[in-house]
Image: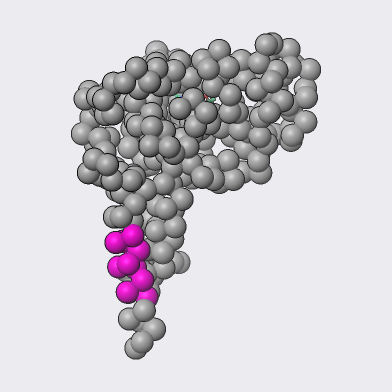
Amino acid sequence: MFGRVRFVLNETSHPGNVGSAARAIKTMGFGRLVLAAPRAGAGILRDPEAIALASGADDVLANALVLPDLDAALQGVSWAVALSARSREYGPPNADPRESAALAVEHAGQGDAVAFVFGSERTGLSNADVERCNALVHIPANPEYSSLNLSQAVQLIAWEMRMACLAHERGHAPGAALATAPAVLSPGAAQHEALATRDDVEGMLAHLERALVDLDFLDPDNPKKLMTRLRRLFAKSHLAREEVNILRGIAKHILERRMRR
Ligand code: SAH
């Protein structure tokens, strides 16, 4: 379970934060740290400040993956959670840290990789980065000063994930932790049905987008927020793999009909 959880730091600047994040996740039993496009490049892992602050988690630091962008960092992940110090008008459904950990464990429990994505020190995550994820989490800190240090945000989420993973291992019924989650976040898929992965949903959205352009429903020169709204709709509905296949089938038929004409 713990091995299926990735902590992704996007465009991080400070080596000290990378070292501290390594320590934060190791103290909670995790070991997968992924850096997407760190400002200083892959050398950040060997920075003396990173090594000093990682302390006994130097192995996590040394084994961290450095990837060119967020898409690469999320490859193979079926459930991704964006962490934001700010609230957003658009984007995936909101959850609090505890609810998001319960849901992530539900995905990990069926064998899927899950990721928590943290933004850069200066600008946080862009809207486009947030949209790549299935849920958006804000740590409900002091409303007058709610921006935590990056590695401290990692620590808090790692702790919530540890609690959720241990509860799962103790044999709490899957979904039991979800009893308190809002309906908008409870899985829509019937029990025992395989949930679609992020890659499945991204592939379906690209397919659907082509079909909507073909139907003249979507104007590629003036797309407005249509795909963003659809992304949000599908994020809310916890699609099963089978349901993604139905949607792809519909898109396929739309595109084929046009070709026959
Ligand atoms: N100045 C940035 C904040 C950067 S803090 C901004 O305005 O967005 C660095 C990262 O730590 C954030 O991108 C987020 O991933 C995480 N973080 C900090 N405080 C948080 C909070 N209250 N809730 C959720 N994530 C938080």
Q: Residue at x 32, y 37 (%)?
A: 93
Q: Position of residue 162 (x, y in %)?
A: 44, 18
Q: Residue at x 62, y 20 (%)?
A: 22
Q: In the depicted view, which residue is nearer to us: 244 or 38?
A: 244
The C terminus - image quarter: bottom left
Q: Is residue 126 visible?
A: yes
**Quadrant in which residue 121 is drawn:** top right
**Quadrant in which residue 60 is drawn:** top right
Q: In the depicted view, which residue is nearer to us: 168 or 20?
A: 168
Q: Position of residue 173 (x, y in %)?
A: 26, 25
What secondary structure is the magenta-colored segment mainly? Answer: helix
Q: How many marks?
A: 0
Q: Which colouring convention does the figure follow? A: one colour
- Residue 252: in magenta span: yes
Q: Residue at x 28, y 45 (%)?
A: 193
The N terminus - image quarter: top left
| Outermost residue to the bottom | 261
Q: Residue at x 74, y 34 (%)?
A: 42
Q: Position of residue 132 (x, y in %)?
A: 46, 44
- Residue 167: in magenta span: no
Q: Position of residue 258 (x, y in %)?
A: 35, 81
**Does 163 sit above or below residue 35?**
above
For this view, does 55 lie left or right of residue 103? Answer: right
Q: Which residues are magenta?
A: 245-255
**Does 101 sit above or below residue 216?**
above
